[in-house]
Amino acid sequence: MIQTLQHLGWVGIGVGILLAIALDACSGGGGTATSGGSTIPAAVGSGGVTSTDTGGAAIGLGGSDVGGGGSAGGTVSSGGTRSAGGTANAGGSKKGGATTNAGGARSTGGITGIGGASATGGTTTTTGGRSTGGTGGGGASGACLGAQVLADLGKTHVLAGASMTDATAATVKADLRYIYLSGGIFDGNSPCSSCASGCTTNGTSCANTAGCNWWGCWQYDKDPPGAYVRNFVSTAKGNNQIPMFTYYQILQASGAAETSSGEMGAANNAAFMARYLSDFRFVLQNIGSDVALVHVEPDFWGYAEQANSNPHLIPAAVASANAADCAGTENSIAGLGNCMIAMARKYAPKVRIGLHASGWGTNMDVLANTSASFNVPAEAKKLADFLVACGAATGDFIVADASDRDAGYYQQVENRNTWWDASNATLPSFTQAFTWAKALAEAAGTGVLWWQLPVGNMSLPNQTKAWKDNRVDYFFGHTAELAASHSIGMAFGAGDGSQTTPESDGGNLVSKLNAYATSGGQAYCP
């Protein structure tokens, strides 16, 4: 069954002009949903501002925010920055018609010796970055999988962070802050040299007087394109936070249907993929020599695996679309992942990069499972094998998500039960999720970063932007379980503009982030 939820975010560009942009967000377990949701920047007002906030804020002349939460108003000045509301209208969780209620091991902590993924192909030396265990899958077991990426980031504890507004980020003690890069790509063959003139996306001008969907022009149009990324990196550094970018372009930029055939068709379109890989290169070039995390295409790899469990057999335009960076790389989905990781090593050497692991990608929605007889570690290994063939073992981490909506939202609005049992007595449970993550990490030979975890808490009234959920409280209350499951971090954020945010949760997440930082965090390795 395919379910589609459409959400509108707004970006206001120029003198009181508002441009409606469709933001789609993924539906929860079992069904497919919308395009996964672009994150639209806070708007640019007359005179030009550059904001690093995500989500649906809008601004007209003089710069007052409309919707989306966050700080109202803000100074509008040429080239300046502004704190501007909005939540991350996001993507990525449980899609694609996966089976649910069909399995799930209940063992605590998972299998510690599951061994390496034996995915076809995929050596770990193709990226030229770091070697992670030789060829043929990078599988490993051990207490400190993922410790290297933490060391590269100057950390020894499990990371904690969120998607949040500038105002929140400026005051909270968090290890990381993430935003989306999504919505569209420039119309030409290469990134625009100016946003003010001659630059369009789907025929719409990127000048401030109109406003387009390309992230490269979410800024004052007289500044060189790419300021949105550069300013976000700078702001995060100023807050002692690691900037994280979720690159989510194939679905929305291509206009493809959100299905395996639709997205795989887009990936095999040489003209589109030439622009896509050029855009990805431009992201990396704007990060440059700075430290950042890059999260590649939530949901996409899950749809790919549902198309064929062997990514070498799924055609994609890779070397044929980008000979400059991907020459010699096979034209397949496996080649695409490997090439994108190699590009990160080439253009942004301090970037740490990871592919997305969808719990439903094997056609079994493991994280929603209710049967105690199902072999969760074996299912995780299937997913790891696929991702390793796509280059995951040569990356730095794997990204996983729990749900794209607060559990209270699903329960009240859609009459669906997406809760994880915090007592771990029944399934689905947190123990099952961490069992899966542990097995996934050990089969791929790298750590797992939990991302876009719902922000709700049990004190909220179950209404728009204030839904009940138990993930924040459980994750912060059981950080030793995260470390034991090779989970290098937890990043919280709204999966859609109607969900709970750090600005609408009554201060719960910010309080827990601050307390966690003050305590020194959960040591990752014993």
Image (cartoon, rainbow, N blue to C red):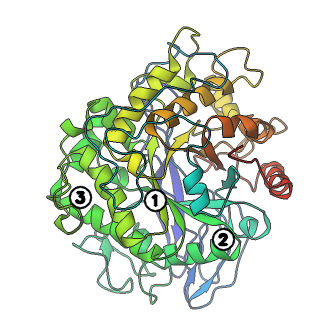
Left or right: 516 as drawn, with respect to 306: right
User: Residue 362 versus residue 34: which sits nearer the camera?
Assistant: 362
Cα separation between marks 3 and 1: 23 Å
Residue that badge 1 annotates: 21
Q: Is residue 31 above or below residue 347?
A: above
Closest to the observer, 423 or 334: 334
Quarter of the figure that contains the N terminus: top left
- CA gap between label 1 and label 2 equals 17 Å
> Relative to residue 496, is residue 344 drawn left or right?
left
Of the residues shown, which amino acid type is indicated by label 3? Met
Q: What secondary structure is marked by label 2?
A: loop
Name which residue type carries label 2: Ala
Specify the label residue 273 is tagged with.
3
Measured from the top left, where is residue 63 in percent x and y? 64, 79
Q: Which mark is residue 84?
A: 2
Say how many tags the image has.
3
Position of residue 364 measured from the top left corner of the image (x, y, whole percent): 44, 21
- Badge 2: how crowded within 10 Å, few (<14), some, or many (20+)? many
**For residue 79, which quarter of the picture?**
bottom right
Q: Is residue 8 visible?
A: yes
What separation in Å lies between label 2 and label 3 (alpha carbons)?
Answer: 33 Å
**Earlier-in-chain disc, 1 versus 2:** 1
Residue at 28 percent across and 68 percent down: it is 278
- Please state, as top left, top right, bottom left or bottom right, where the C terminus lies in the image: top right
Q: Residue at x 19, y 54 (%)?
A: 329
Amino acid beneath label 1 = Ile
Helix, strand or loop at mark 1: strand
First along the sequence among labels 3 and 1: 1
Q: Is residue 469 visible?
A: no
10 Å crowding of disc 3: few (<14), some (14-19), many (20+): many
